[in-house]
Amino acid sequence: MEGSAAVSSMVLFEDESVDVRYGTGAQLQLSPCGCEFTLLKPAEVSGHPPRSPETLRHPPKPAERLRQRTRFTVSSYKEVLVAALAFRNKYARRPYLPEELVPTEHMKPCFSVDSDVRWPEWSSCAAELGPGGKTIVRSEGGRAALMLSPSGEEFSVEFTCSLSQTASQTPETVYRSTSVVQHHSVCSVPSVWSYPLWLARQLHASRLSEPEDVPADGDVNPPDISTVERRTRLPEALPLTCSSPHWHRWKVKDVFSDQDLRTELVKVMWCHGVTYRILNGAVPVVEVSPGDGSVIRSNGVLNSYFTHHKPELPSGRVKEVTYHLDTLPPDVPGQLFSVGAVVRHASRILACFTEARQSLALPATPSCLTELREGGHLSRPARMEEGLFSPDSVEQRVTHAVESRSDLVAAELEKIKRFNFLLENNHLLRNQTGSVRPEAVAADEEILGAVSKRCVAEEIPGAVSERCVAEALQRTSRAILDIDALISDCKEP
């Protein structure tokens, strides 16, 4: 496979696995941890008839599929893997940085793997204007920087990160580090970036304010932030090797058809230069970055409406335009992208994601990153409201006990899938007269109650307690026992 093969689309799934498609028809897939990949090469198409002498002398190559460790890839695939990892690391929670795939000129030695940084106080933080009207905030010492886009609706971060390591490395080892760039939405902010984002938004707002609206020195009332709260821990690289390679699941279908999108939870999709991001909250939202600095976002429960945040340079003002799916603007000659085509595509992605999330037919196979998430290395993003500061402690309010029960919930849902199948083939649940047994109805109601509680636990983590999750599990377990007993009773002659 040539390294120059054009990329047609890239997808990062909710489990942080990656699917890349090329114009040649080839498909590259990365495991969630990034340690392993598969490459599917399409079969060659001969220009001669199947039984022609030329075809018999030089038969076309059949489809080829190979599976390798990412860091040990051969030089033929190195370029495409570097590009796939860059896409993964841009949107995943933690980067995968094998030394073999990081260019030498981008590495520098370091003698510490300490990832703590401290951000400046509001009173001493100076505004830095970046290219295109970006607002930049840098940490003390310069190990991390946050860049707020001109629209104020998305931001990127660049930070120094040690390369992925093995467990055998010791504090005497000379480590190597590199710079990592990540992109985020202001509507879904990892707690590590909450404070610097607040700084950037305040600086952005003050720059756009009229002179008479800017308070004199000493009149600003910033939040009471201590040194401890201004200190955050940067994301660390994933381990060099995966501890659970048996959990790697390879997707062999074309995930970009609507039918297959309904069976996979998509987190980020890049297609034809446009990035589509799903914000997976209580009400899922799709956010579009067309590449011109603007952001288009669906309006929550009113998902047929989209708001376009368009920065106006050089003033820096942001113009908001609302679209409806039934009244999208016509294409204008010379525009960089079609608003109608982008919004319709975003709406289809959101509809498929919502259907996939609600479906109990989704596989509950654990990801190889599950143990790392439960160990506290990965945090769920915090939600931020306009003009409010969300401290690092927001996500810490959710107890670790609730997080550790997620796998148990998934296991119970697998049993519920079994019951749903039986309901669809309900001859076992009916007696000889054809009436539904009361026990089945009671069990069904019990399960629906458990699933409802499970939805609350999964989608509104800040409002759930350990007791609520435990009750849901107990209810589901009791219902499953009743179902098993009912099935055994029905099978008896």
Image (cartoon, rainbow, N blue to C red):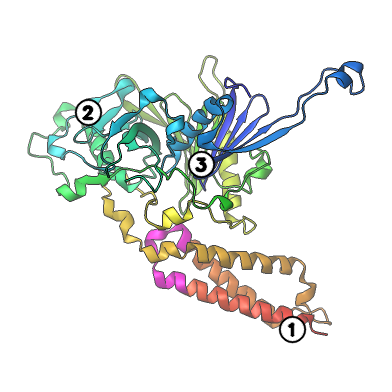
Image location of residue 180, percent across then percent down: 37, 33
Residue at label 1?
489
- Of tags 1 and 3, which is closer to the observer? 3
Pick the residue in front: 375 or 303.
375
Please tell me whether residue 459 belongs to the stretch shown in magenta: yes
Quick one: label 1 or label 3, which is nearer the N terminus?
3
Q: Which residues are magenta?
A: 457-470
Q: Find the distance from the CA under tag 2 to the CA under tag 3.
A: 44 Å
Mark 1 is surrounded, within 10 Å at the Cα level, by few (under 14), some (14 to 19) or many (20 or more) other residues, namely: few
Residue under the point 80% across and 73% down: 427
The three-letter amino acid code for the residue at tag 2 is: Arg
Judge depth for marks 1 and 2 and give the one in front.
Answer: 1
Percent of width and height locating residue 426: 76, 71
Question: Which residue has dot 2 on it?
Answer: 207
Which badge, 1 or 2, comes first in the chain's sequence?
Answer: 2
In the depicted structure, whether residue 71 falls above or below residue 230: above
Closer to us: 163 or 456: 163
How packed is label 2: few (under 14 Cα within 10 Å), some, or many (20 or more)?
A: some
Residue wearing tag 3: 35
